[in-house]
Structure formats: C-alpha cells, structure tokens
Image: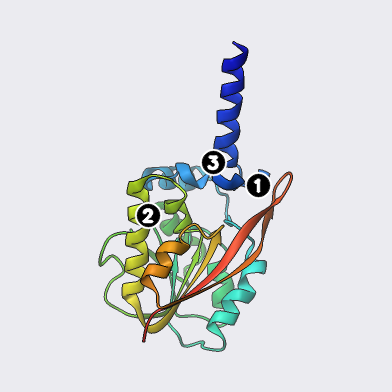
Amino acid sequence: ELLAAQTIAIVFSFQFLGPGFRSLPAENSYCSQSSMFGPRYWDAAYASGRYGKSYEWNQSCDVVMPYVKRLLQQDFGSRVLHVGCGNSALSRMMHDAGYTRVSNVDYSQVVVDIMRRQEPDLTWLQADCTKPGALGEELYDYCIDKGAIDSLFEAGSQSMKERGCAMIAEIHRVLRPGGRYLVVSNGGVGNAELRKRFAHVEEEAIEGYACDLYYKLIMIVVCTKAQ
C-alpha cells in the first residue's frame, strides 16, 4: 500500500510539473497544455468562462510587447497574422500601438465569437492552422504565436507532433518571402522543427511566470523565411 501511494504521488507530480518541470503557475493552473487536444476542450473552456475575460499563456503582454515591437519596427502597414490568439490582450495592444492590419486567428469558434463581441473593431477568424490551406491565399509579413504551437508539441504524442509540424508548414506557406515568425514558447519545444522549415532561426531566453520554486524558461524565437 505504501509503494502504491508513493507511485501515485510520483505520477501526480510528473503530470503537474510536466517534462522538464514546465508547470503552469498557480494562477494558470486549470490544466497543462499537454491535455488540450481538440476544439471541444477549448470551446467548453471559453464558454464556461474558465479563462476569464482575458488570459495570457507563458508571459504577460507587457513583457512580450517590446519583442513584438522590435520585430514589427515602425512597419504599421504590414499584414500580421496572430495565431492561437484566444482572448489574449495582445490583440488589442498591437492594434492600439498602430498595427491595425492584424488577423487574429483561433481554433475555437466560441472564443472567436466572444472576441468579436468584445473587440468588434479588430479582425477575428476561426481556423484550424494545422490544415493545409486553412489560412487562405493572402500573404502575411509577420506571424505572432504566443503558446500556440506549444499546445501541440507539449502533448507528447506523435500525432500531435505531426499536427505541430503541419501548423508550422501552414504558417510558413502564408508568409511572404523574407517574412518573419515570432514564437513565444515554453522552453522552445518546437524549435527543432522550426529550424527544418525556416532559413534562419534566432532565440533568446527570458523569464516566464513565477512558479513555487522557479521561473519558467520562456524562449523568444524569431524565424525568417527564405527570400
């Protein structure tokens, strides 16, 4: 019985902390990204108000926005794709900073409908970015991703890794030659696949949300498509 109890405790600790001890902080502890497999989870979560009016993965918008501005510079007329937008305040923050040609895309129709009501002057689209052609035929100058591909690669299964690779391929397809893809990632879990697809990949480590005994390691990854 003691051995069984110890085994249960070990399994619980691994599930909570995750590979590499990449846990969500207490304020973000509804469940790990690795358990989020399909639209039913996301639709139900947003419909129930689980993620409140606004929810931020990995790091706050105040911390992330300077990296977004460094990427976009003063290119206010550029076309920007924001994938896995959820109900993050980053969409509004980019718009208020002058980047008004932003397409905010999410897997969940529920959150897209919510955000259309909350922020009607912004552009909101529903799409499964792992599907070839899902993002249409228009080309974008930049793509912003704050935890989107993480939710696929952190799942740990081969099928979800394949979906992560498919999402990277679809984003690469709709970026213009020389276009750039900014990924705010929990530990850079998709970096190996990004390097296979993009001509140049740079990364920089920053602190993520504080957990009980440590800070999450967040990677700011900038990928450039070949000219």
Residue indicated by mark 1 = 25
Q: Quadrant of residue 157?
A: top left
Give the residue type that dot 1 points to.
Answer: Pro
Q: CA distance from mark 3 to mark 2?
A: 21 Å
The answer to whether residue 9 is seen in the rendering is yes
Location of residue 49 in the rendering, given as x and y in whole percent from the top left corner: 53, 45
Q: Nearer the viewer, residue 116 or 77?
A: 77
Residue in the picture at 57% in, 23% down: 8
Q: Earlier in the sequence, mark 1 or mark 3?
A: 1
Kindly report the distance in space between the C-alpha atoms of the residues bearing marks 2 and 1: 27 Å
- Numbered label attached to residue 109: 2
Q: Quadrant of the C terminus?
A: bottom left
Density class for disc 1 (Cα within 10 Å; few <14, some 14-19, many ≥20) is some
Under mark 3, the amino acid is Cys
| Marking on residue 31 | 3
Dot 1: what SS?
Answer: loop
Q: Helix, strand, or loop for circle 2?
A: helix
Confirm or deny contact between disc 3 and disc 2 (CB under 8 A). no
**What residue type is disc 2 on?**
Gln
Query: Relative to residue 203, is residue 191 drawn left or right?
Result: left
Residue 23 seen in the current view: no
Residue 108 lies, with reference to residue 132, above or below; the image says above
Relative to residue 21, is residue 167 depicted above or below?
below
Residue in the picture at 45% in, 85% down = 78
**Mark nearer the N terminus (3 vs 2):** 3
Q: Nearer the viewer, mark 3 or mark 2?
A: 3
